[in-house]
Each structure stands twice: as C-alpha cells, then as structure tokens.
Image (tube, coloured by chain):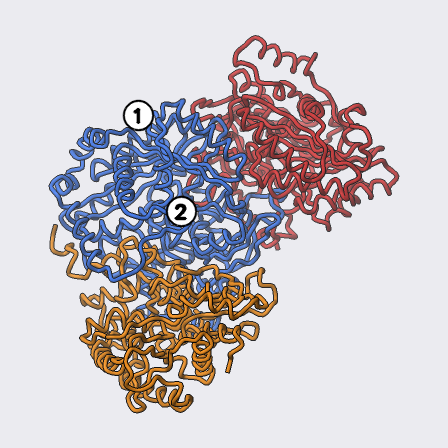
Chain colours: A red, B orange, C blue
Amino acid sequence: MSRHPLEPALEAAVGADHVLFGKRALMQIAGKAAGDIEPPAPTWVVQPASAAEVADVLRACSRERVMVVPWGTGSTHALHARDERTRVVLDMRRMTNVLHLDETSLVVHAQAGLTARTLEELLIPRGLTLGDFPPAALGSTLGGLLSARGAGRLTPRHGFLEDACLGVSAVLADGRTIHTRVAPRRATGPDLSRVLMGSEGTLGIITGVVLRIDRRPESRLYGAHAFPPTLDNPVAAAIEAVKRALAEDARPTAMGVYDPAALAAHYGAEAVPGDLAGGCVLVTATAGLVDLAAADLAIIGDAAAAGGAQPLGPALAETWWTMRARAYGMGYAAAAPLPPGSDARRSALEAAKLGGPGAAGTLAPVDLEVYARLDDLPRLYATGVAHIRAQGAEPRAHIGRFDSAGGILFLAGAPALDQAAREKLADVLAPLGARRARATFGDPALAKYLHDLKRELDPHGILNPDRAPPRAEAA
Amino acid sequence: MSDSHVAGKNDPATEHCTYCPKLCRHACPVAAADTREALVTQQKMQALGELRVGRRPWTEDAAAPVYGCTGCGLCTRYCSHEIPVGETLLTARRELAAHGAAAPVTHNFAQRFAARDRALVSALRSRFTATDFAPRGAQGKVGFLPGCDSCASEDGLTDVERTLALFRALGLDARLVDLDPAAGPLCGGMPLASLGDDVALAELARRHAASLASYEVVVMSCPGCVGLMRTRFAALGAPLSARIVHLTEFLAPHTERLARQAGTGPGARVHYHDPCHLGRGLGVYEAPRKLLAAAGMETAEFAWSHADSQCSGGGGLLPITMPETSRAMARRRLGELEANPDNGDAPIRVVTACPTCKRSLGRAASGRTEVEDIASVLARALGVTT
Amino acid sequence: MIHPSQAERLASACAKVVGSARVSRATSDRHSYARDQWPRVLIGMRDGKGAPFPPDVVAWPTTTAEVAALVRVARELGVPVVPYAAGSGVCGGAAPIYGGLVIDTKPMDRILALDTRNATVRVQAGMNGERFERELNRRGFTLGHFPSSIYCSTVGGWLAARGAGQMSTKYGKIEDMTLGLEVVTGRGDIVRTGVDGRAAAGPDWTQVFIGSEGTLGVLTEGTLRLRRSPELRILRGFELPTVDAGMQAIRAVMQRGLRPAVVRLYDPFDSFLAMRHRAEAAAAAGDEGAAYVPTPPPAKGLAGRLARSLASARQRVQDTLLAGALARPRILNPVLDSLVPKLARKGCLLIVGCEGAARRTEVEARLTFAELERAGGRDLGEGPGLNWLKKRYAVSYRQSTLFAAGAFADTMEVASTWERLPDLYESVREAIGRHAMVMAHFSHAYPEGCSIYFTFVAHAPDRARMERVYDAIWSDGLSAAARAGGTISHHHGVGLSKGAFMAEEHRESMAILRSLKSVMDPDGVMNPGKLGLAAPPRLTDVARAS
C-alpha cells in the first residue's frame, strides 16, 4: 500500500512514534472493552503533545481535506466511523501538562488532555481542589468536559464547571492558535471562549483550559432527612425542600433525593431506614468554613423539616458522599481535609489510588438520565417509575445535581432496561419536560447560524463533522 | 481656562443638565410614556440651553421639547443639584413665544384662558343657587373656590355639589366664593404659569386679590393653584389677604368627626393618587389618606406613590401641547393597577384630590377603572351625596 | 450620514412597519440620539459643538416583530442600524457614527412574565433599571443588579454591554444572571437563546449575544434569574493600612468561600474623598437613609443654591492647589500620595456588606468581618457602610459639576487575576497619572481576581489640548492594562473608545468575533464601527467624503 500523502506531514508534526494507523491503533486507544472497531477508510490515531503540534496536524489535515475527530477518554462511539471518509483521530491524552498553577489567584492553566481526576490528584497535595463537582464527570479530559455542554456538572457551592473556566486555548481548522486571555470577568464583546466550549470540537480543538480552583474545604458536614410515605407526595416535598433551601441562599456541595430502591442498590440494604417504602431520603453534604457549612446544613434541615421530613443523622449522607466518590476512584477527594503535605494525606491519596480503605467502589448502573426543571421533577419521577414498573422491571430512581432551576433524574430498572426500553422511557418523559443532554441545539432558528459559523471557521468541514448540527435543522 | 469653556454664559441649571448622564430618566413621567429621547429631562434642558445661546435656531421643531414637561417636579427629587427643571421649562415658554417659536396651539392662550374662565364662572353660577355662595361683604368668612377643571363638566360640577354637601354635613361653614358673574376670576392661573405668562398672571393675581379680599380662608380643590397663589402672587405684586388652603388641608382637622359620622363602612378598597402639586408641591401626603381611612376606606398604593407619585399627564398644559403623550401618561398610570395581579379582575377605584388629575385620569379610565374626587367619595361615605 | 434620498426611502419603509407617528426625521429627534455618555463628546459640546453623530431616521417599535422588520428594511437598503435605549454608555457604543437608522427599544419596557415560584423574570429590553428593580421589590424579589447608572440605563443596555452592579460580588454580573435572550439578528431573524438551557448542544449563544453591543443584532428580551429581596443587610467600614493589605484582605475573604454583596476598597486618595464625603453627609441633616430611594430635600426654588454650589465647585477646581495640579498631574499625584494619608490620618477605606436570607447572612457577615480583621483591617463600624449605601449612586452627579467647572472626568475599569492585580494597579495608575489626577477603588471581587475602577480628572487650556490629553490617558492607560495582563474593560464595554485595543485584548481570538459578525450580520449594518470591528467600506467611504 502506498503511503498516504498526509502521513509524512503527521509524522513531521508529532513524530513518527505518535502516529498510529488503522484498526490496531483504534483498538489500542479504546481499550479491550470497546469491542471491535473496524475503520471503513484510512484512519490515523495522532497523539500531539502541544498546541503547536495540534496546529501542525490541523494544517496538514486542512490541506488534505481529511476530517479530524478529537478524542480524550470519552465514549468510544466517536471512534466508530459513520462514513467512508479518511480520518485522523486526535488522541489528546499526551497533552497532560499543567502549564501554570497560580496559587495566589487560585487559577490553573492545564493542557486539555489531562483528566479532571488527574488534575485533582495533583492539586490535593497542595491543599487545593477543583471543587466538589460530581465525581462521575471528572474522569473525562478537561478538553472533553468543556467541549461538550452538560446540565449536571455543577455543585451549588462552586457553580457550573463551565463557569469555572476562565478561558481556553484552541486551534482552529486552518491551524490558527487561539488563547483567550484570562480575566475574572470582562466586558469586551461576546464571550469568545463560550463559542468553542460546547461546540464539541466542530469549530476548533480545545488544547488548554484555564480553570478557577479552590482551597480544600476546612470542614465537611453531612445530613439526611426522610420524607415518609405518609406524606402526600414525598418526592415533591423533597424537591420543594431543595428549592426552598437554595432560595434561602444555602450553598451545599451536593444534595440528592433517593427512593428506597435506589438507596439500597447504591449503598446497600442497610442504608435504607426502616418503613420508607413509598417515601424518599434527602441527603446533603456541605463544606467550607465550619460555621458556613453548619449554616447551610441547618437551612437545608429546616427546609426539609418544613416539608414534613424526619432527621436521620449524618451517617447515611456520609456513606453516600464517600461511596459516590470512591466509585469513581476519588475516595481521597471526599475524605475529611488533612493538613497539606502531611504523610497522612499522602498515604490517604495512595490508598485511594491503590486500593484498601477508600479504594474504588461501585455504584448501581443508571439506565436513563434526564434534566428537568425543579417543578417538573416530581411528575417525571412518578411517571418514570410507573413506566418502568409497567415494563415488568423493579424501578429505582434518584435526583441530584441541583441548581436553582432544575436537577437531574436518574432512572433504572431491575433488570436493566435495554436500549429500546430506554428510548421508549425517554419518549414518555420528553413531553413532561425531560431533556436529554445535547439532544437539541436549542432554538432551531439558531441552527443555520451555527451551520454558517462552522463554515466560516472550518470552511472544508474537517472538524468533527459528526457532531455538527444536522443539515435538516440548518435549512 | 479659555473663554470658550467658561460656564456661565448659560445658566447653571441648563448647563448642569447638559452634562448630566440623564440621572432622572427613571423619574420623568413624560419620557416614560413617550420615549422620544428629545423628551428626556436632560434633553429638554439641553435644548433650552442651546436655544438660549444660539446653538439651535428658534424654530417650532427645535423648541418643541420645552413643552414636554408637566412641571411635576419628580426629576428634581432625584437631582443632587436640586435643579428646578419644571419651573425652568414652564417659565422658559414665554421666551419661545417672544422668539416666535411657540407651539401654535399656545398662540393667544391668555385670551382663550380668560374667555374659558368667564364661561366656567357662568356655568358655576347657573348650576348653584344663591345660598350656595358665601354672603357678599361679610368679613372673616371661608370661601370655596373649585378648580376650573371641576367646572368644565357636569361630572365635575357634581363633585362641587358634593363638596358643599360634605362641608354642611361636617358642620363647616364654607361656601362657594361669591364670584363676580361677569369677571370671576375662578382659576388661580396655573395654565398661565405653565406658559410662563407672567403678564397675564399678574393681572389675574390682582383680580383675585380684589375678589378674595373679604375672605379669611379660601379653600381650593386644585393644589397647583394653591401653591401658585401662596408663593407667587405676592411676588407678582398682588399679595392675598386670605389664607389659601387645599381642600384636604381644610378637612384634615375634622378627620375624627368624619370617622364618627361615617361609622363603620363597607371597607371599600381605593387607590389614592397623589397629585404632584399636593404631595411634592405642598407636602400633603397623609391628610387625604387619613380622611379616606376615616370614611372606612382601605387605601391601596400605586407602585410609585407619595413623594414618588407619577403625574397623571394633566399638568403643564400637556393635554393641549401634546395630547397623545398626555393620554399615554394617564393610561400608563392606570395601566399599572390593571396589570397588578393583586387586583385580579376586580373593579378598580382610584381617588385623587385634584380636579385636573381626576379629569386626566378619568379620560384614560377603562370600563374597569373609576376615577373619583376625594370630596365626592367622602360625601358618599356620609350618605350626603345630594 | 446617508444620502438624503436614501434617508427618505428608509423613513417611508420604516413607517410602513411601525406607522408614521413612530418614525421621525425631525432635527430635534435626530439630535437627541446623536451621542451617548462618552465624555469625550462632552468636551466638544462644551466648546460649542453640537452632538456629533445624528442618525438619519429614528424609529420607535413596540414589538419584536417590528424590530425584525425594521432590521430587514435597513438591511435591504444597506444602511446602518444602531439599537439605542437609554444611551448611558460611556464608550460611544450607542453613537450612530455612520448615521442610518436608530431603533429605540424604550417603548418595549414591559415585564412579560414574573415566575414567583421559580424566581425568574422575562423582561423587555427597554425596561428602565430603577423602574424594573422597584417593581421586582414590590413583588418580593430583587435582581441584585445595581449599576450607578441604574436610574438612567435599561436591561437591554446592561445585556448589550455586559454590565455589572455594585453588588456583583454576591449576585454576579448581568451575564451571570441571564438564562436566555430574545434577539433580532442582523439578518432580521428572531431567535431565542437558552432554550433547553445547559442540556442543549452547541455554543452558549446567550454568552455570545451578551456584550455584543448591538453589533450582532438587537437584544429585545431577557430571561433573568431573581433572588428574594434580602431579609437582612449588614454593612461595615474597615480601614486597611495600605492598598496592598486591602487587596490581600479581599482575596482572603473571597477565597474562604465568603460572598459579601459589596466589597469596595478605596486607594488613599479615593478614601480621602470618600471620607470627606462622609463628613459632609454627616453634617447634612436627615440621616434616615431609605435603601433604594435616595431622599434629597423636597423641591423648591433652588437656583440660588445651585449657583452657589457651582461657584464653589469651580472654586475648588480653580483653587491654587488643584488648578495648577490638574495641569501638572505628574507633580500632583505624588504630592497627594504623600499628603492625603496625612490629611486624612487614615489608610484605605474598605466598605463591605453582606445581604440575603437572614440566617446565612448573619454567619457570612460575622466570618467576613473576622477575616478582614485578621488581615489587618480596623473596624470602623456601620457608619461608612450606611453612608455608602445612601450615596451609592451619587458619583454620576459629579460629572455635571466638573464639566461645568471646565475640567473633565472619566473612569476606566480594568480587571485581572489576583496575581497580576498589584502590577495592574501600579501600571495603569502610573500611565493615567502622567496626564491626570487619578484615584482608584477595587470593587467587583471574585475568588480569582478583582476589578479596579480608576477615576481621573484633568484640565487643559483649550478643547484641542483637552482632547489630546483625554486620548493620551486612554491610550496609555489601556496599553498599560494590556501589558500588565489585565482586561481593558470589566463592565463598561468597548463601544467606540476602546475599539482600537480589541486586537490587543483578544489577539487571535478576534477571528472568532469576526466570524460571528459575518454570520449574524453579513451586510455589516449592525452598529458598524464598534467593538473593534471594521465598518463596511461603503460606509467608511461616505464618512470620509463628508
């Protein structure tokens, strides 16, 4: 087979060692679990180490009109070609340097291939943290996290992850390199980094991110409240308590509403308080200065009590908090704060990574997650659970990732729902206000603008075309 | 500092306004209802300043913004320089006339004003019997001089009738000023002051001084004219011997008696509209509210009330110079109540203490909203409507 | 200016959209839209120049559909469209520099929906700030957005320029409280952002249109997040020995996770003025300060008093210290530096305030004050805080006095991360200080940084030299800000005056801005020449010729 003209250019850009070809390359980066990935057309995996190398790769691909798919740790769907176009998979995972850690401003500038979890591991020994974002999200690369939008990547204490992003570095299709300059806020036109964030690599490849970070919290406090089945609608009462607490300015680090089945599935039958069938539990973690954390806990406690809940004490919520973190290999992040640099800290970190106390646990799988307004969540919960039961499965559900406007409902069945059943469930919930992540591009009237913007920034359409807005909407 | 920069070739008020970032924008009810930028207080004052120093030609178009003011005084409340914008703009209208830039509708206004005043006096004299008027010649009596906008309609004359009935019911010996059937004068002259016509105003003041000479107290329902007669007439060379009081000031000492006579009423809910000249002008905010409460009413408030009250659109001759804008102001004022979810779909009652406000708001009232005069409302509460 | 025959066509086409009563070519109307509050224009006006940028036609639409139709009309004729509401911007952003059509959005000033359960509001762009806030207060809510221009600015203007209020440290800037927008694009389409919220794919269009200053389209409506009216407000003054100590103290508070509503640190000269102002205020009678409503004495004939206050202001500017000093700022600023702390016998004043739901506010205030004391702050009690609250919009009123007295004043608001902030402060202060008397305060604090608000006053013998001084201040000041790694604007926007510095601010990212522009407004009709975006040649050629 003769050499494709692109290959020498790729090798010149990143070095021959970092240009891999074909099925073997895909299998190698996707790992065993990915199954069989058979590329229908010539496919390279290219592993750049810097924005400059990314720029060289894009210039070459632009010249040859070869499509480029950025890849981090994300879904292996991205590796399955949808057409017979020649492609370059841009494996970002060599780009793992922290470029600048500003401990005065609490700002970190890191390359996009670094996973949030790895970054957190680097921050912790310094007494720093990304913040208590949902551990489930943090396994992704920073570039991946910020390239795609997600409703639930937040903690009421720190806000949304993308709001913590003060700027990005990126490379456009023609190899132009962009660094948005860092300022806490500015009033100099549109937020240009927000054009790239959320565009899933279709307008440019994010090569670096500047994130606001935080110090490790001084304290962590936990609380749990049972909304008994004797209430009219225990889930509605729990959501109302969440809403009231947020309106009272509480800034917990996380809150979750669990039905007994979900509680048992995730945290063991012993986690479920007695006679809760038909009711639910609100678990809460707060953090920060101890008086503030205590105030937040008290505000939430009062809101729950006003809704008819009974206090359960902190143990259940502490279990929830630590197991949830351990499940994603972040047990250390959930641990009580320790003096920076101490041996105890280091060994806790090692333990979390290597196994032993604080090692990775597992959580029960989730079949469908949807985002909805707070007001819509109780009805969605009831409808979803009833639908799963009607399909002959034992339903379980929890609700979390709350912001002042909405939250995420996690639904599952035992036995698990198959793909068709999940889609059916989503169809049932959609008219009631349930939204799935990235299912739409917002107002259809804006689609043509996104389409045209892509044509402006990527005239040959080489950047991740699979995620560009569908043509039908772009009419 | 070169001469070109020296302030003072213009008067400080217009100059300050010229350099101001329009900080009373939220306060001007004219600009809120009619969003032409030329009607923002700052622009009106800048226009005046530029006319005066010759940067704008004295044309009707260039001068038009100067008419876009009702003299309500709310802007001054939000001016840390306390610039008397209303007074400045209203007074300046005589300069427009002198330069031939006056709005055509204001031409010969003084003559038309005088003719209207005579017509209203004769309407008033023919509507009421001799016993409704104060006895001629007696000294130390209390006379009632209704606002001219009350005398311009049957509805307004009914308010006058009820005011007299209210006086009687409260045992107050106050009757209509015994106006000269041929010469009046009835109106205190706010319309003339609104065009800065000091010549006609001085003439009117002299006639009032003569007409009211035998009264100790003159009660007026029009707060604008109360303020004018109290503060300006002396300066115009016609000091009044009588004490001029507004109707609500006159009634205030009798609030308790009113309460006793009214008994416990049905507790109707009314919105009280503070007339600009009564509130910001005379500082009377509580007396009318207490009177309404004494008569068993629950007084609800506009969003902008008391010292923040918004003009009904009736002042400053705006109904003549900019009738559309004037109507829009009144509609806006009432629209707030109609849009307020607290009021549901229930009928809305608005009470005010100024015939001009009543007339202006009344014209804009929808079927759902009724605008009433305070004396009429109080009289009805006492059951003495006729 | 466009050709008169074209203006005629434009006016009659607009009249078909909104009715002839809502379109004007009258001189008085055109002149009233011929500038915003860019102080450089006032320098010229004082010298007898008229307002410099009259549009050719003004239209007052009442619906979004009308706005869209007007944009299409202008687009067909290829004439500029400048959205204009209250015109309170200080950067020339709303000035119709190439004439054309002004679309005044002020007739669109209604609250469309107030969702009290979910604390959100849909409001039209032309809504006046103070009127809006009061209506929300009446319903038990606050937006928490208190720019000193709140009396004279609109929701649309806040959104268009990425504004900030004085309590942004708790409530955020306008972009932090916006959930969605309705926009008429430069193509004349009506689009909504924020549909499906963060669940939607693609760029966050809300954050694209916020700050676009009319260059991409006309903002017609916003959906904003509200907060309940605060149950409790606790204010304090602290005295910090130095600016540096003050910065450290604010940083410590913010990085502890505390979110006071207000944090303002005045540098020594600004502290001196703030303190003197306080003394004056205390001397004046009537201290009953209504929080939202300033209560100056009732209106009366005050022309005499006004004249006196002007005379005394002029006196102040002209007196030996200042008159000489304003012309020789290089000498003045060091003199003030050494003199002012002694005069005032004070260091830097810091105003801090917490507000919100009672329970958390109490705790937050206690912890915040403790943190400030730990950082070397001396508690001055609530007096300075209450006084600030009462006088918080007063600063804008001083502009008239200064201009009437023959000087000029302006403000420059820059921001950076904490690491760069001391350098940013020193560099910009030094750069402006070459030309003007300069003072600064630090406000709008974030865990990662802060904004600095420079106020400068200068004077020159004639208009030409005054404009040169003015331009030099901006050129030197913004270059210094960019060199120090700060942003050239935290909340005033770019408009005309900072356009030349956009390339330095965004560098290669300008490519994205230019792409957005060509996509949203392919004919370049939307507010041409602003935001550092070049106007189409057909407009610049006409402008050059006239």
Picture residue at 40% right of the left edge, 43% below the top: C491
Quick one: B326 or C532, which is closer to the camera?
B326
Q: Can you tell which mark lies on residue C3?
A: none
- Near mark 1 (Cα within 10 A), the count class, few <14, some 14-19 or many ≥20, is some
Secondary structure, mark 1, is: loop
On screen, C161 above or below A299? below
Residue A17 locus on image (x, y percent): 58, 19
Picture residue at 19% right of the left edge, 61% below the top: B11
For residue B182, say whether it is visible. Answer: yes
Mark closest to the chain's N terminus, 1 or 2: 2
Label count reads 2
Residue C7 locus on image (x, y percent): 37, 69
Residue A42 locus on image (x, y percent): 66, 32
Q: Which residue in the rendered view is the most extreme toward the top?
A: A343
Q: Quadrant of the N terminus of chain A?
A: top right
Q: Quadrant of the C terminus of chain A?
A: bottom right
Q: State the image quarter where residue C330 is shown.
A: top left
Report the residue marked by disc 1: C241
On screen, A71 above or below B156? above
Q: Chain of mark 1?
A: C
Q: As shown in the figure, which amino acid type bears the numbered disc 1?
A: Pro
Q: State the image quarter where residue C416 is shown.
A: top left
On screen, A138 above or below C202? above
Tell me whether the residue at label 1 lies in contact with that at label 2, contact meaning CB atoms closer than 8 angstroms: no
Whole-angstrom CA distance, mark 1 to mark 2, is: 28 Å
Residue C364 locus on image (x, y percent): 49, 31
Report the residue marked by disc 2: C147
Q: Chain of mark 2?
A: C
Quick one: C375 or B204, which is closer to the camera?
B204
